[in-house]
Image: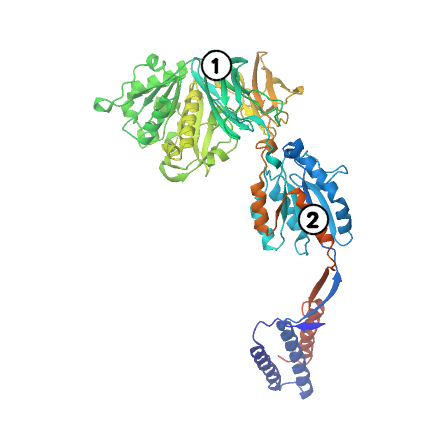
Amino acid sequence: MKVTLDLPLPLPILAFLGLAAAAAAVLSYSLTRRAATPGVRGLLSAIRLAALALALFCLAGPSSAGGDRREERPPVLLLFDGSRSLAIKDEAEGRSRVQVEADLLRELRPVLDRLALRYEVSVLGFGKETFDLPAAGPTALAPETWLGSVLAEMLTRVRGRRLAPVLVVTDGVNTGGRDPQAVARAFAATQHPIDFVGLGGAAGEKVMDRRVRSLTAPTTALLHSVVPVHAELTFHGCRGQSVPVRVTCDGKSVEERQVSVVADRQQVRIDARLKADETGQHRITVEVARDEREIDPTNNVRSTFFFVGRTTLKLLLLEGGPRWEAKYLARGLEGVEGITLEVRRPGAGGVLALGDAAELGTYHAILLGDVKAAALGAAGMQALREAVDKNGTGLLMLGGLENFGAGGFGGTPVGELLPVRLADDTGQRRGNYTLRKGASAPVDFLLSLAEKDPPSADAWQRLPALDGGVGFGPAKPGAEVLLEANDGRPILVSQTYGRGRAAAFASDSTWRWILMDAKGQELHRRFWRQLVLWLARQDQRGERNFWLALERFQFLPGDEVDVAAYLVGPGDRFLPDARLESVLAGPKGESPLGLAVSASAYRARLVPEEPGEYRISARATATGGAVSSDEVRFVVAGSDAELDDPAPDLELLKTLAESTGGRYLRPAEVLPLLEKLAARDERNIVERRRVRPLWDNLYVVLLFAALLVTEWLVRRSRRLP
């Protein structure tokens, strides 16, 4: 055994300090004459010197170091990919990747048995995580491959151990989890190389797949308007083919074309336009002709739904002077099919000519920009109130410097329409903020940023921040906060007033979204388009008192689908005491759907796993016996992440092998490698060192305490200070 010290200071300095402390201890008792005999003083000095010596002992940090040498069985890890992409047949002689895996493991069994005599051999399968291989060998059943997460699991398993080879047999397809390259760098830091064995693409074999990757269309459209449809197609191994593609609406052909494929991994965008000739919900489908040689014949079709309102939309924008918000709002709405926008500005004397309620009632929605109440006049504001109340015209006041409370709208007919209290306005607020959906936001298309976006606040948080705006007073009773800032203050608030809807929007800087990129321009246009459609009641509700609403109509397996059923009575008051019966019909049949009462709707959440079309039907019986019904459809698209890109990613495997200091191998090179390891005539001797602190234990603490107590007792008995 060897004793080592962990000195906090150089030894000469520590020795000097110890001697000085010892001298001080002895001298202090030598000077104590009262009631202390020489023997007592000597005893006390000895006790204090012993305590000081013990403190110096602990300060020096002595430890005993020992160890032993023994033979160890280092781990040998073999990981076999067990995901669905291994079923692809692109190996020599038409074999699948998993067949090559199985043949390889069968070939390795004898040498693995020999290695097991001196090594700890583990043979595992993996997908999102590792699992024991079945007795029959590797399978191709795992729905995903999380290569980085599996490597991280292995790193935890072997950390601190001497490691023999780690071999990972895979096609390199990675669908999620941790970044494999980051984990590979962590392996390299521990000096544990990994050898990767690549599968797929042998002898130039090509896989064939025709896939509809995405399908987008507006969630709503106006009657007789043109609906744009966009689809992204991917063709693998189809070079030289002419592939038929068909776009249908409710089963009727909209467009048919032939796509000429000139590359092995070609992507094609399909743009089609259809006429919205009937109100209600309609199904759009894009279908690529199937080929029996495809690896996945289920991804050739994709569908979604859209809702058609009653008519074209006529809008009126009342605006003061030129400003960015009004400019880009008008530009965005003017480019939307089925919407006409008229802009009016104050004339001579700063007065806006509005006309009477009958004239204003011809507009579906009116947007009130940065205009003072005086510019509208008492008669104009009364006409606006009547147009909303009697004719059902929607009204939205936009953020500005000279409207809301600052514009003198408090106590006016327009102030009565607005869903916020103008008397409590805090004026203009500065600073940047992002948006999130309010707690009372409805479950429908209104606040959905894109057809394929998840129904969460994340999509709003990714938009460029807004700058400043009006500091609203609190929302009026019954009003709904649709959007709020990230600090919780309301930004978009709405309420029903008579037959119409009225809303207040605090911001005047949504034009900043346009600066993001082309995607930002589309999101800006989509937001304003959906908002004015909602204001004009051209949404999923229309003029009904009972309706079902979804945020979007296209989902993936495992997505959460939020369903809301709205039932309102006179004055659009929510009726919470009705009896509801609802049924969900899907690919596996019908089942009851429980809709529970919440703050302003009957709600349910479901998680469909099976691809296909779903229909929700609901029937509401109010307290007075009135019966209403509605139904809504949505589609769950088939999705197989393992087959999204069927080509093996062998370049990734080469990069990972290089990062860890390992090798990239083909299956034929594995057996010679393990044979060479099994032929080694060497013993795996491991020396283990054990270090045990001598000062860090209970006995030292008890001894120190005993010395201090003994000194105190002696001093107490002799009445010494």
- Camera-side mark, 2 or 1: 2
Quadrant occupied by the C terminus: bottom right
Which residue is at the front of the view, 167 or 565?
167
Which residue is at the front of the view, 390 or 615?
615
Percent position of residue 456, x then y? 52, 32
Note whether residue 541 is visible: no
Which residue is at the front of the view, 557 or 708?
557
Note whether residue 225 is visible: yes
SS at circle 2: helix
Percent position of residue 594, x then y? 63, 23
SS at circle 1: loop
Residue 451, compared with residue 464, is above or below; it is: above
Specify whether 181 is left or right of 363. Answer: right
Which quadrant of the figure has residue 18?
A: bottom right
Which quadrant of the figure has residue 302?
A: top right
Q: Residues within 10 Å of mark 2 (few under 14, many from 20)?
A: few
Label at residue 543: 1
Percent position of residue 564, x then y? 56, 23
Which residue is at the front of the view, 609 or 177?
177
Specify whether 293 is left or right of 367. Answer: right
Q: Callout 1, which amino acid? A: Glu
Q: How many marks?
A: 2
Residue 569, compared with residue 523, is above or below; it is: above
Q: Callout 2, which amino acid? A: Pro
Mark 2 highlights which residue?
672
Q: Residues within 10 Å of mark 1 (few under 14, many from 20)?
A: few
Quadrant occupied by the N terminus: bottom right
Label at residue 102: none
Q: Are marks 2 and 1 in contact (CB under 8 Å)?
A: no
> Mark 2 to mark 1: distance in Å?
76 Å
